[in-house]
């Protein structure tokens, strides 16, 4: 008698298409600052909404000032952040101080808002070791320059938190380019396998230096890569602070409730160059593309939203701008006062106890530096 079992239809392409179609971009505020998804509206008080705007405005000013300080030769390495405020600041806004942040080189704003003093961020930019001496109780790791490398560390930090029974998460950020690294897949897979409380961010600003997103992967989205690790993947409008906040808050809640990690892809754009080291974005991006993305600006849209609620004004914004400028002035002064780095600092910062071969070198340098 012929078997009655029904054979599944085999269509590999259809399976892929089916999966890819599931990843629609989540949005709450449109470009006009209108709520398009009221049921997903996060519960933030008026004060919290204003604080989120304050931090984004402050961060935009910090970016402008950092660029000009870099041009004056007063800062070193700097990766501009304008355009990415909703991705960076609104995601961080959903975190708690006990959470650990593992940043990439462009994620200095998040670690400042997590407690790293501004003058230390400037020292990091100057390559001064004191920039990476994170104060006790500030749960951040130094910004990682190696693309995607912090993904693996995040899986480890998250697992450590789980083992210690902490109700906290480890959060990391990389760019679209970072998601092509082996570390990316290893990190999300490991965290998934161990149900570690991690949140993996990919800020998809459309380019890895000059390489456009569609040349980096055949995947329609980066969020869908979560499927291979068996973890939730979310595609969100990275220019919409409320949407970014809502998905991060949700990922955090699931993580601390023992439900494991989430991968979040934020669709965003960096207005400036890759870094201040000299790339020219006009060689790989059109001015039409710039204009199209500037229309999505997170500050403009959130300002409209808040103004319509009577929660924001030019006067309020000017106060934030003045405060940011003053803080930056003080912080750069403090950074200028840091002692000049010595070779012996490098050695003593690396080791609690120097190995015998370095002891000798240490003494030689100590002798030289004392003159
Ligand atoms: C492992 C590694 N490979 C290459 C580089 C050189 N590099 C620096 S930034 C960058 C592009 C990263 O692009 P993306 O991940 O999209 O981040 P974005 O700079 O756009 O925020 C590359 C290839 C590096 N730092 N580390
Ligand atoms: Mg990128």
Image: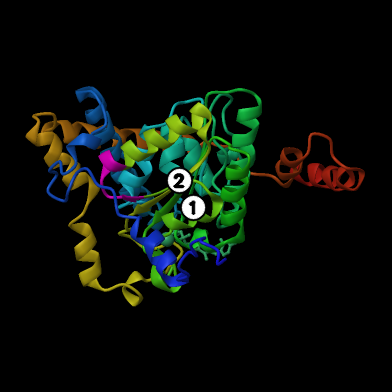
Name the element at disc 2: loop
Q: Quarter of the image containing the C terminus?
A: top right
Left or right: residue 77 compared with residue 189 = left
Q: Which residues are magenta?
A: 235-243
x, y percentage for residue 219?
43, 66
Q: Are marks 1 and 2 in contact (CB under 8 Å)?
A: yes
140 or 202, nearer to the observer: 202
Q: Residue 31 lies in magenta, yes or no?
A: no
Classify mark 1: residues with Cα within 10 Å, few (<14), some (14-19) or many (20+): many
x, y percentage for residue 126?
53, 49
Q: Residue at x 64, y 44 (%)?
A: 341
Left or right: residue 362 compared with residue 166 = right
x, y percentage for residue 222?
43, 59
Q: How is the image coloured?
A: rainbow
57 or 38, nearer to the observer: 38
315 or 96, nearer to the observer: 96
Q: Quadrant of residue 175?
A: bottom left
x, y percentage for residue 101?
51, 37
Outermost residue, bottom side: 283
Residue identifier under label 2: 232
Residue identifier under label 1: 226
Q: Residue at x 59, y 35 (%)?
A: 158
Ligand 2 shown in quarter: bottom left
Cβ at disc 2 under 8 Å from ligand 1: no
User: Vertically, is 149 above or below 351?
Assistant: below
Name the element at disc 1: helix
The span from disc 1 to disc 2 (Cα, nearest Å) is: 6 Å
């Amino acid at each position: 008698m012929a078997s009655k079992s029904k054979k599944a239809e085999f269509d590999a392409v259809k399976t892929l298409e089916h999966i890819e179609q599931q990843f629609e971009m989540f949005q709450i505020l449109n470009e006009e600052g209108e709520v398009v998804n009221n049921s997903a509206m996060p519960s933030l008080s008026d004060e919290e909404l204003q604080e989120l705007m304050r931090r984004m405005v402050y961060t935009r000013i910090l970016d402008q000032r950092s660029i000009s300080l870099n041009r004056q030769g007063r800062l070193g390495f700097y990766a501009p952040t304008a355009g990415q405020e909703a991705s960076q600041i609104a995601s961080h806004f959903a975190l708690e101080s006990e959470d650990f942040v593992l940043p990439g080189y462009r994620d200095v704003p998040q670690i400042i808002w997590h407690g790293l003093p501004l003058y230390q961020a400037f020292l990091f930019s100057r390559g001064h070791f004191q920039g990476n001496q994170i104060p006790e109780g500030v749960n951040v790791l130094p910004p990682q320059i190696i693309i995607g490398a912090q993904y693996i560390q995040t899986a480890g930090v998250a697992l450590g938190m789980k083992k210690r029974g902490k109700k906290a998460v480890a959060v990391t950020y990389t760019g679209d380019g970072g998601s092509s690294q082996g570390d990316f897949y290893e990190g999300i897979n490991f965290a998934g396998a161990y149900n570690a409380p991690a949140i993996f961010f990919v800020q998809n600003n459309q380019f890895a230096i000059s390489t456009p997103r569609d040349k980096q992967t055949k995947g329609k989205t980066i969020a869908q890569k979560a499927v291979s690790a068996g973890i939730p993947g979310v595609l969100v409008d990275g220019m919409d602070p409320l949407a970014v906040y809502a998905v991060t808050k949700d990922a955090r809640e699931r993580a601390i409730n023992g439900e494991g990690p989430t991968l979040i892809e934020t669709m965003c754009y960096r207005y400036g160059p890759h870094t201040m080291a000299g790339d020219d974005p006009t060689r790989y991006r059109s001015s039409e593309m710039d204009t199209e993305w500037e229309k999505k600006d997170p500050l403009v849209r959130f300002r409209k939203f808040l103004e319509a609620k009577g929660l924001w004004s030019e006067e309020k914004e000017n106060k934030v701008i003045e405060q940011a400028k003053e803080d930056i002035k003080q912080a750069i002064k403090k950074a200028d006062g840091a002692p000049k780095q010595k070779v012996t600092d490098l050695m003593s910062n690396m080791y609690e106890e120097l190995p015998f071969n370095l002891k000798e070198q240490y003494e030689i340098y100590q002798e030289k530096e004392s003159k």
